[in-house]
Amino acid sequence: MPRALDDLIEAFSSLPGIGRKSAARLAFFLLKRPVEDSRDIAQRIINARESLKPCKICGNLTDDAECEICRDRSRDRSLICVVEEPSDVTAIESIGEYRGLYHVLGGALSPLDGIGPDDLNIKSLKKRIDEGLIEIILATDLTTEGEATASYLLSTLSAGDVKITRIARGLPAGGSLEYADKNTLARALENRTKLDR
Amino acid sequence: MPRALDDLIEAFSSLPGIGRKSAARLAFFLLKRPVEDSRDIAQRIINARESLKPCKICGNLTDDAECEICRDRSRDRSLICVVEEPSDVTAIESIGEYRGLYHVLGGALSPLDGIGPDDLNIKSLKKRIDEGLIEIILATDLTTEGEATASYLLSTLSAGDVKITRIARGLPAGGSLEYADKNTLARALENRTKLDR
């Protein structure tokens, strides 16, 4: 195999969820397409990586000093939703229902990986707790690390009158009781909600 | 979502087997890694696309005028294995058992897509039929297009004494009779091979 092809397959294999076979498929696909397609994708990779940086307020990705959400004066500034990664902002925005602000931690507490509170954007979150804030929604993942991060934030945020909430645990849409794990099922029962007639 | 991010996700989504969600995952992955990683992958894409071209003998991908296999004097020059794509060469080479040469057609006959004999490297294959050649192995896919291409080649290659063969049809390794389609099962029975005691 020519060196340049091997190098490309190796690069694609280094991406998450792409094994050697898929990487080869991607490489051969690009090699069949016009050279402009390859130049375009290469340029977009470089553009994105070089122009995007953390918003100086919330840590979300932006091509400006402040992200579009922080700049948007129509958003509800009394609510901050705390998430681990910029991709979580994208996920929540895709619902189209949340109108508050965000705070991106840049990860979750993970002592085994050497990630402590100082490695996350926690100080900047504390600075955002001001008069107008009514609620902080802890929307870190429901993994061990995400739960630990939520617990840590709950104990460390001296939020005064600000309400701190956690996203709900329960069965996912389409989920069946039979296959749910005990923990999920227990929480789904515990956090049951009243139905209106 | 910032424009540069959207552009990158769109580019990844255009690759085969990568949906919008996987594309977003790849983009966020790159954005978390050092900028050098993004520059490296972009450079490898451009390098591969610009340096690789068809071997002027067999049509396989190469960074030289002739590919490594055609240049390799230790290969068996009495055998040519005809395949659709350079990726098929990689697949056969990965077995490590075939020692002959290749001929890459650059696709398969597909009247619906407007791909006729003149769009494939068939003329150059005919030119390669010379005194030393003993066998042409038709190793196009066992799809409708691949089978049509194999039939066409069989009828059009005036190969003199050269033997023309087709790769075997049968059950794949690990395959079970119960789930095999009728066509495959019929061929597996028809083309049964004698076992040595």
Image (cartoon, coloured by chain):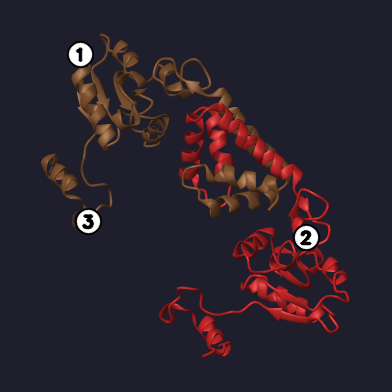
Chain colours: A red, B brown
The residue tagged 1 is B158
* Label 3 – label 1 distance at C-alpha: 39 Å
Dot 1 falls on a residue whose secondary structure is: loop
Image vertical order of residue A141 relative to residue A189, above or below: above
- Amino acid type of disc 1? Ser
Q: Judge whether residue A109 can be spotted in this image.
A: no
- Amino acid type of disc 2? Asp
Q: Judge whether residue A94 can be spotted in this image.
A: yes
Image vertical order of residue B159 relative to residue A117, above or below: above
What is the crowding at mark 2: few (fewer than 14 residues within 10 Å), some, or many (at least 20)? few
Q: Where residue B179 is drawn, which disc sits there?
A: 3
Q: Quadrant of residue A163?
A: bottom right
Front disc: 3 or 2: 2
The residue tagged 2 is A72
Q: Nearer the viewer, residue B71 or A21?
A: A21
Tags 3 and 1 in contact by the CB under 8 Å rule?
no
* Label 1 – label 2 distance at C-alpha: 72 Å
Q: Nearer the viewer, residue B182 or B100?
A: B182
Dot 2 falls on a residue whose secondary structure is: loop
Q: Quadrant of residue B73?
A: top left
Image vertical order of residue B12 relative to residue A40, above or below: below
The answer to whether A121 appears left or right of B3 in the picture is right
